[in-house]
């Protein structure tokens, strides 16, 4: 077996020091499934805004931390590096706050 000189992308490379908006980068897309890297640099959802997505979303915080609020829960969930959760389709949620930087891995897929 011979070694090949192949470049492997790194999830922690190319991070902005600051950005006005979150950075969404599609890493892999297939019919019915999309994997994204999301980089937050202190952003939060606008006041009164709720995500209401047609697909399920599994998210993991790789670095940093965030507060994620669900419309049907009284308090936000605190997410730290290593935490992950499944957000079912049409479960309204919002990002209350993020650390700078917070790196998310998100997998979007068709609901059951």
Image (cartoon, rainbow, N blue to C red):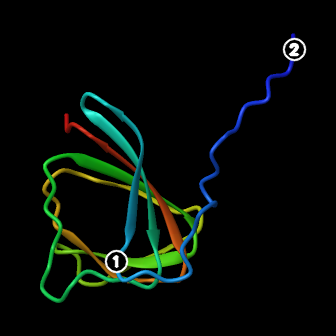
Q: Reply above or below: 40 against 89.
A: below
Contact (Cβ within 8 Å) of mark 2 with mark 1 = no
Distance of label 2 from label 1 (alpha carbons): 43 Å
| Residue 92: quarter of image | bottom left
Mark 2 falls on what kind of element? loop
Where is 10 relative to 38, above or below?
A: above
> Callout 2: 10 Å neighbours few (<14), some, many (20+)?
few
Q: Horizontal and vertical percent for residue 97?
A: 38, 85
Q: Give the residue number, with chain letter if any, for mark 1.
A: 21
Given residues 26 and 62, the one toward you in this image is: 26
For this rendering, which residue is in front, 59 or 33? 33
For the residue labelled by badge 1, is the local secondary structure a helix, a strand or a loop? Answer: loop
Per the image, the residue denoted by label 2 is 2
Question: The N terminus lies in which quarter of the figure?
Answer: top right
Q: Is residue 86 above or below residue 44?
A: above
Identified at 19% across, 46% down, the residue is 55
**Where does the image place residue 86, in percent across and percent down from the top left?**
35, 53
Of the numbered discs 2 and 1, the one sitting upstream in the chain is: 2
The circle drawn on residue 78 is: none
Determine the residue positioned at 85% across, 21% down: 3
- Where is 13 relative to 72, above or below? above
**Residue 26 rendering spot, x and y as whole percentages:** 39, 47
Q: How many marks?
A: 2
Q: Seen from this angle, which residue lies furthest bottom?
A: 47
Crowd band around label 1 with a 10 angstrom C-alpha radius: few (<14), some (14–19), many (20+) = few
Instruction: Work out which residue is located at the far top of the displayed protein and give it.
Output: 1
Q: Between residues 5 and 24, which one lies in front from this camera angle?
A: 5
Residue at (25% x, 80% y) in the render: 45
Left or right placement of residue 1 versus residue 51 in this view: right
**Considering the image in quadrants, where does the C terminus appear?**
top left
Residue at 34% x, 41% y: name it. 34
How far from the left and from the top, in percent, is residue 103?
A: 52, 66
């Amino acid at each position: 077996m011979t070694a090949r000189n192949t470049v492997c992308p790194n999830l922690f490379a190319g991070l902005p020091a600051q950005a006005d908006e979150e950075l969404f980068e599609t890493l892999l897309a297939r019919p019915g499934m999309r994997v994204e890297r999301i980089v937050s640099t202190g952003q939060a959802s606008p006041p009164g805004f709720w995500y209401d997505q047609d697909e399920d979303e599994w998210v993991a915080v790789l670095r940093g931390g965030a507060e994620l609020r669900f419309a049907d829960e009284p308090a936000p969930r605190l997410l730290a590096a290593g935490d992950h959760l499944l957000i079912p389709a049409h479960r309204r949620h919002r990002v209350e706050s993020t650390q700078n930087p917070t790196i998310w891995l998100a997998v979007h897929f068709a609901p059951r």
